[in-house]
Amino acid sequence: MANTLWDIRAISYAGCAAQLFFFLFFISAEYYLLTIMSYDRYVAICKPLHYRTLMDSRACATMAAAAWGAGVLNSLLHTASTFSLPLCQGNVVNQFFCEIPQILKLSCSESNLREGVFIIFTISLAFGCFVFIVVSYVQIFIAVLRIPSEHGRHKAFSTCLPHLAVVSLFLSTAFFAYLKPLSVSSPSMDLMMVVLYSVVPPAVNPLIYSMRSQEVKDAVRKVITKCVSLAVSCPSFRIQDL
């Protein structure tokens, strides 16, 4: 953001490493927290009588700490591995921030075996989280469809839809950004997809989650009504013809 405001295109070596670390840390922690939230929705809908026992404050704190700890470990491994490689292909990163694929292109080493192992481990862990989310929602949908009343089904679905929307947006953009075919890859396409998965989901998260709150809906409705009424009641002016 600062680079954009001041039109700065240079970043120090340490600043690039710090940027990569925090990017990986926050994006990993968000994904792990989304996985934990799917378990929370599963317990709330499939085991409502045991919810306060399974999801007490201690369990929530433990799972949150595990998510943040795993994010720190993941970002440390990748940052240390990436910046331990000698860089000799110039210093131009073809991205708006320091990203692993773009930094590896500057490496002198043709075979980045260690970073490849870490990437495979991260992909396996991410796939495991994805399978966990899918299984959780399959169980949730089965339980919801068994609810006899339409009001009960609607209430259960409304509980899950914000989380499901965020997960779908996050995963679809991230998967397409890194798993798209090379035939459709281009610098402009890479830039657009990275913006989508790194900027758009965090930006819309508060909106998606808060719109379930009736108080937020009422506040938004009042603001819109007030703006419309002000626009209607504002006096009009006639410009004198020359």
Image: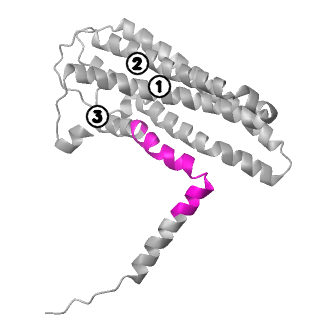
Colouring of the image: one colour
Query: Which residue is depicted at the point 34% across and 85% down?
Result: 235
Please say whether residue 179 is visible from this viewpoint: no
Q: Residues within 10 Å of mark 3 (few under 14, many from 20)?
A: few
Residue type beneath disc 2: Ser
Residue 93 versus residue 113 in the image, above or below: below
Tell me the CA gap for discs 2 and 3. Answer: 25 Å
Q: Which residue is mark 2?
A: 75
Tell me the CA gap for discs 3 and 1. Answer: 24 Å
Q: Are marks 1 and 2 in contact (CB under 8 Å)?
A: yes
Query: Which residue is depicted at the point 19% across and 26% down?
Result: 92
* Magenta residues, start to end: 197-220
Find residue 28 and name its label: 1
Please give left or right for residue 21 compared with residue 65 in the image: left
In this orientation, which residue lies closer to the viewer: 204 or 124? 204
Asked if residue 198 lies in the magenta stretch, the reply is yes
Q: Which residue is mark 3?
A: 187
Figure quadrant of the C terminus: bottom left
Tell me the CA gap for discs 1 and 2. Answer: 8 Å
Tell which circle, 3 or 1, labels the residue nearer the N-terminal end. 1
Residue 108 versus residue 230 in the image, above or below: above
